[in-house]
Image (cartoon, rainbow, N blue to C red):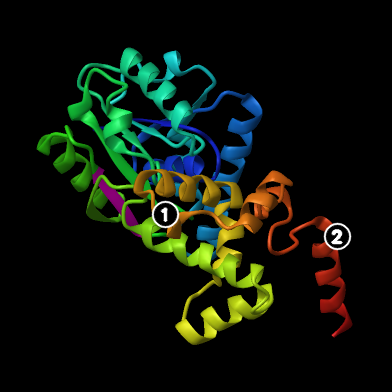
Amino acid sequence: MKNIVVIGAGTMGNGIAHTFAQSGFKVNLVDVSEEALQKGISTISKNLDRIIAKGNLSEEQKAETLGNITSFTELSEACGNADLIVEAATENQDLKLKIFKQMDELAPENCILATNTSSISITKIAAATKRPEKVIGMHFMNPVPIMKLVEIIKGYSTSKETFDAIFEMSKTLGKVPVEVNDYPGFVANRILMPMINEAIETLYNGVAGVEEIDTVMKLGMAHPMGPLQLADFIGLDVCLAILNVMYDGFKNPKYAPNPLLVNMVTAGKMGVKSGEGFYDYSETKKAEKVARMFQR
């Protein structure tokens, strides 16, 4: 497999495109708007600069990586010779089913169709296609270029050949693939999201404040980031969507999203992406932080 199509130029999509391109694959990056594509490629360029600053990449390698990426706003133009298509659109079941139906109609017969979903059933997604044996989950972790783990999720009909091909390909990307079966939330989010939800519950009940809860988990449990800050970086809307999928799938109240999370998302407080979640990421806050640094 040499020709890769990535659908979605957002946080996960541009990270996946970056990772494939840096590993020498030709990548067609697809999004509905030219603005989203340019923003995604700009993010890839900045992330490559960070790698260069650490001495782990040359300017020539950066140019090669960016040269491996071509952007498209039309899926029909992007996947004519695709060996693998990785869908990294919003965590919305109806949207993913629609995209997979299009992918199936447009992609070559031997093309593998993968989804970066973090919670939605691979079997259900595969059922939207006429090639369920070639549909698989590739759940990358954020930030994709840095995090080693990839959950490889088999649907009910995923063939051994498809699984083996994607498992081995993940290794060529410098990742550590882990085989996971098709249950809501898989492994990562089945464990992570209840922890985040419980941290929100702890805040909701007034047990402690945001920074206090995160500090306990960082210093007491050796987590690199507290659960509330992590939720902000994942996106509170994404956390809510995953919890809803798990709650619907298991019918277990322990997966029911906390009312505070629901209200924050309804109010547009999505975390880093919106400038405010459990923490304030606005430009005003950044300016205040810089001012404090100069006052020291």
Q: Position of residue 234 (x, y in %)?
A: 55, 54
- State which quadrant residue 105 falls in: top left
Q: Position of residue 136 (x, y in %)?
A: 26, 37
Contact, mark 1 vs mark 2 (Cβ under 8 Å): no
Q: Which mark is residue 141?
A: 1
| 146 falls in the magenta region | no
Magenta region:
148-153
Q: Report the Cα–Cα distance between label 1 and label 2.
A: 30 Å
Relative to residue 72, is residue 217 depicted above or below?
below
Going by the image, does 177 lie left or right of 10?
Answer: left
Residue 29 visible: no
Residue nearest the viewer, comparing 237 with 258: 258
* Residue at 52% from the left image edge and 79% from the top image edge: 217
Examine the residues drawn in magenta and state their main secondary structure: strand
Residue nearest the viewer, comparing 268 with 174: 268
Q: How many marks?
A: 2
- State which quadrant residue 80 falls in: top left
Relative to residue 48, is residue 213 depicted above or below?
below
- State which quadrant residue 280 falls in: bottom right
Question: Quadrant of the image for the N terminus?
Answer: top left
Residue nearest the viewer, comparing 44 with 208: 208
Q: Earlier in the sequence, mark 1 or mark 2?
A: 1
Q: Which mark is residue 284?
A: 2
Q: Position of residue 146 (x, y in %)?
A: 43, 59
Question: Quadrant of the image for the C terminus?
Answer: bottom right
Q: Amino acid at mark 1?
A: Met
* Residue at 57% from the left image edge and 60% from the top image edge: 231
Q: Which mark is residue 13?
A: none
Q: Amino acid at mark 2?
A: Thr
Tag 2 secondary structure? helix
Q: Position of residue 206 (x, y in %)?
A: 68, 75
Residue nearest the viewer, comparing 84 with 50: 84
